Image (tube, rainbow, N blue to C red):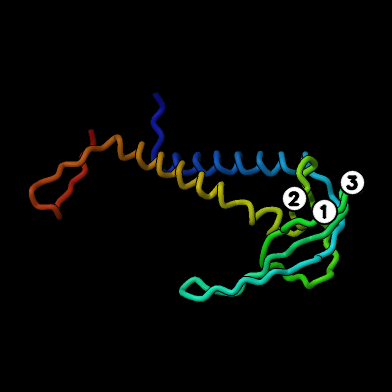
Amino acid sequence: MVKINKAVGYLLGLLLTLIIYFIGQLLFFINAEKVTGKICEIRQLVRAGRYGGRYEFFYVCFTTKENMPNKANAGSNFKYDYGDTVTLFYKKGNPSKVRINEFSALWLMHIWPYVILFGVIMAAVTATWYGTKYAVISRNPCSIKLRNS
């Protein structure tokens, strides 16, 4: 049996998450078409409170390769104005799945499920690492000691 320390486990978890992320990105780009469209609508949402702020949701109008007009939500908080021409990618079978050809839209906006996956993998690594130890709890709740098994 190969023993892996905690740091190597975390690095392997990060590597696994990145591999899954890049496979997902690759599958999107394999099944995507590149077209030009225009920003045809900008919806604004203003939220008050602790996590409030002003959010802008951008909609693009474009014609698919099959000459079908389409309007889709492209994301939020870009630096575009109404009527700006943008290059975008859409999924062949589902033109409502669009990404503007910009670094943040292509690589960062769709990363959140993978961040959650990374957290689950790190929790599993931590649980496995702590599984090699056991806790000795005394009557004094402030003195918890870990001992190697």
Looking at the image, tell me whether mark 3 or mark 1 is earlier in sequence order: 3
How far apart, in angstroms, are the residues tagged by discs 3 and 1? 11 Å
**Type of amino acid under label 3:** Lys
**Type of amino acid under label 1:** Asn
Where in the figure is residue 82, as x and y percent of width and height?
80, 71
- Is 59 left, or right, of 131 in this rendering? right
Where in the figure is residue 53, as x and y percent of width and height?
56, 74
Above or below, 29 against 141 in this view is above
Instruction: Name the quadrant containing residue 133.
Output: top left
The residue under label 2 is 96
Q: Quadrant of the C terminus?
A: top left
Front: mark 3 or 1: 1
Looking at the image, tell me whether mark 2 or mark 1 is earlier in sequence order: 1
The residue under label 3 is 65
- Is 112 left, or right, of 32 in this rendering? left
Residue displayed at 45% across by 43% down:
120
Q: Quadrant of the N terminus?
A: top left
Looking at the image, tell me whether mark 2 or mark 3 is earlier in sequence order: 3
Number of the label disc, if any, that sits on residue 79: none
Residue displayed at 71% across by 41% down:
26
How far apart, in angstroms, are the residues tagged by discs 2 and 1? 8 Å
Callouts 2 and 1 close, C-beta under 8 Å: yes
Q: As rendered, which of 79 and 70 lies closer to the eye?
A: 70
Residue displayed at 76% across by 70% down:
80
- Is 112 left, or right, of 65 in this rendering? left
- Is 99 left, or right, of 24 in this rendering? right
Q: Secondary structure at mark 2?
A: strand
How far apart, in angstroms, are the residues tagged by discs 2 and 3? 14 Å
Q: Secondary structure at mark 1?
A: strand
**Type of amino acid under label 2:** Ser
